[in-house]
Amino acid sequence: MTAAACEPDEYAPAGAGMRPGSQLAHLVGPGGAGKTTVGALLAGRLGWDFIDLDQAFLAQHGHIATFIDTQGYEAYARHNVALYARIRRALRRPGVAALSSGFMTYPAAIGGGYAEHRAAIEAAAHTVLLLPSLDVERCVDVLVARQLSRPYLDGDRGQHERRVRERMPAFLALRCARHVGTEAPQCIATAAKARTTATKSSVTGHRFLVKSRSSAF
């Protein structure tokens, strides 16, 4: 991987900034997009804490697929929102949070302040949506292969494919920064760090759409 391959091709304005004083950057997107890997790298480079919401859920409630099978998806979503809220309230240092793949697609009716949390995350300048492509079928191919390699998720390929297709419209509708591409996580983290640093020192209210070159992930 050359240094040039880590550089984004294009930047474009994309919406409003986060509230002054906010200390939590969010990585959002479908499962397999690289949120956990990139998030850990980004947090390390910034000297911030790293929060993996899926791992926090596993620590408190056990295997995610088993929880959903026994208690239902809505119960899982409610518990996950409550867990996020507790983590957010307890935050004392700047952090990078890798959110669960479905977090930005839950129905507003699950309550627990979810609609407010979702709106704040979407509006924050340090929120980045990670996608391997803007093409749905390309996303299906890349993301499902990654998801099936994870031991804490079920291995139903058809279910994972349906989930990606169902959620993509919601992800594409998000008005937050995007990083689109399949380059190495180190390159994505480099771009995210540059954006985070630039946002902290620039006028609030600007974001960037990043269209990236593709390479092995």
Image (cartoon, rainbow, N blue to C red):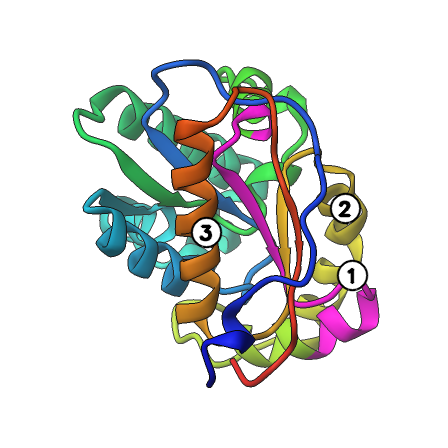
Q: Position of residue 197 (x, y in %)?
A: 38, 40
Amino acid type for the residue under numbered disc 2? Leu
Residue 70 rendering spot, x and y as whole percentages: 47, 50
> Is residue 197 toward the left or the right of residue 116 in the image?
left
Residue 192: assigned label: 3
Q: Crowdedness of circle 2 by 10 Å Cα count: few (<14), some, many (20+)?
A: some
Q: What residue type is disc 1 on?
A: Leu
Task: Estimate the spatial distance between the alpha carbons at disc 2 and disc 3, rounded to whole Å.
Answer: 19 Å
Q: CA distance from mark 1 to mark 2?
A: 8 Å
The residue closer to the viewer here, 32 or 191, is 191
Is 10 positioned to the left or the right of 77 in the image? right
How many numbered circles does the render carry? 3
Q: Position of residue 111 (x, y in %)?
A: 55, 18
Q: What residue is shown with label 2?
A: 172
Q: Secondary structure at mark 1?
A: loop
**Residue 66 visible in the shown view:** no
Tell me the distance, in whole angstroms, between the alpha carbons under discs 3 and 1: 19 Å
Question: Eyeballing the image, is 164 above or below 71?
Answer: below
* Labels 1 and 2: the sequence-earlier one: 1
Q: Which residue appears at 53% of the width and 75% of the height?
A: 4
- Report the residue marked by disc 1: 134
- Dot 2 or dot 3: first in sequence order is 2
Residue range of the region highlighted in magenta in the rendering = 122-141
The answer to which quarter of the image holds residue 99 is top left
Few, some or many residues within 10 Å of mark 3 (<14, 14–19, 20+): many
Please tell me which residue lies in front, 206 or 133: 206
Labels 1 & 2 near each other (Cβ < 8 A): yes
- The amino acid marked with disc number 3 is Ala
Q: Residue at x 71, y 61 (%)?
A: 164
